[in-house]
Amino acid sequence: MTAETRSTDRLTIAAAATLGLLALAALVVPAVSRHDPLAIGDVLATQLLSPLSRDGGGAFHVLGTDRFGRDLFVRMMLAGRISLFVGVGGSLVGAVLGTTVGAVAGWRGGFVDRAAMAITDAFLAVPRLVLLLLCVALWQPGVITVIVVLAATGWMGVARIIRGEVQGVRTHAYVDAAVVVGMSGHRVLWRHVLPNALGPAIVATTLGVGNAVLLESGLSFLGLGIQPPRPSWGNMIAGGRDLIVTAPWVALAPGVALILTVLAATLLGDRLRDRIAGEREGARVLGERV
């Protein structure tokens, strides 16, 4: 094992551990904490306490409090629960939609392929941010709306990837053998072709999680995503931007959590892509030797 490989593996382990800890904290901290992340108490006595400080009642605040006296750490973990759910949910729904469109287009070919790819290219020609802003302007902001919007604007890349993979896999001998023995085209596609074409789509979906979390935070920052008092990292950053000089922790804490999440998801996606590419190269070399 080379030094470069060992360094890559350490980064991958660190990225996976970071995502795991964030997800675990997002699930556990709001459930066991004595601080209500949505309740507003004695604002004058508890607002804008600095990190690692105690309020008048003796309660300890790891990351301090916001302008309404709410514990920032607990609130940030609740926001992480929402942001991660929206990011993963939007990416998975988009991946399922893109996989379906790409698989059908690549397998059927002809008019179906041309029509599906024309629609895909039309969506790809419009900047995703414009589509996001248009969709959230048409429907009331909320968790479900953001997931649907992220899925509706993120399926096109997966569709193109799956289409290309299906077109390549369908030329293999085992696909012809399955057709010869009498299997229906539908069964051949979903049982034999698609499972062997999913690798790049899984990579794209993993990379898309970080992008979806970032887009959700951007929408919430603009007031078009998750609406207060329900927290997300985006609206928490927006709520603390005017305090960046007097109480920088209010905006910096969720900002750091957002950066770590996007970076970790990207590193995992890159590692998965490299591994799949290595396996394919190994299979190709073995095939040439045989």
Image (cartoon, rainbow, N blue to C red):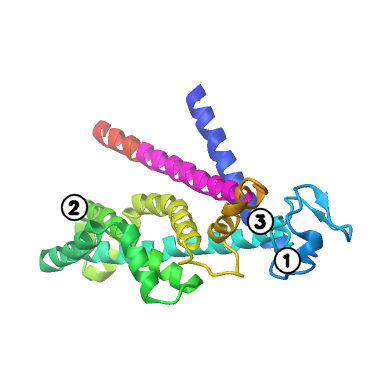
Q: Position of residue 154 (x, y in %)?
A: 35, 60
As helix, strand or loop, the secondary structure at mark 1 comes to: helix
Q: Position of residue 169 (x, y in %)?
A: 24, 53
| Residue at image point 58% right, 53% down | 242
Asked if one can make out residue 227 in the rendered structure from this viewpoint, the answer is yes
The amino acid type of the residue labelled 3 equals Leu
- The quadrant in which residue 116 appears is bottom left
- Residue at the disc numbered 2: 171
Q: In terms of sequence position, does the residue under pointer 2 or pointer 1 come before the other? A: 1
- The quadrant in which residue 73 appears is bottom right
Determine whether label 2 and label 3 are within 8 Å by CB: no
Residue lying furthest left in this view?
110
Residue 216 or residue 154, whichever sits in front: 216
Q: Where is residue 282 in the image (x, y as percent from the top left)?
A: 34, 35
Quarter of the figure with the C terminus: top left
- Residue at the disc numbered 1: 31
Q: Which mark is residue 284?
A: none
The amino acid type of the residue labelled 2 equals Thr
As helix, strand or loop, the secondary structure at mark 3 comes to: helix
Q: Residue 24 carries which label?
A: 3
| Residue at image point 61% right, 48% down | 244
Which numbered mark, 3 or 1, is in the foreground of this view? Answer: 1
| Residue at image point 44% right, 45% down | 269
Q: Give the range drawn in magenta.
A: 253-279
The answer for how far apart the CA atoms under marks 2 and 1 are is 52 Å
The 10 Å Cα crowd at callout 2, few under 14, some 14 to 19, many 20 or more, is: few
The answer for how far apart the CA atoms under marks 2 and 3 are is 44 Å
Which numbered mark, 2 or 3, is in the foreground of this view? Answer: 3
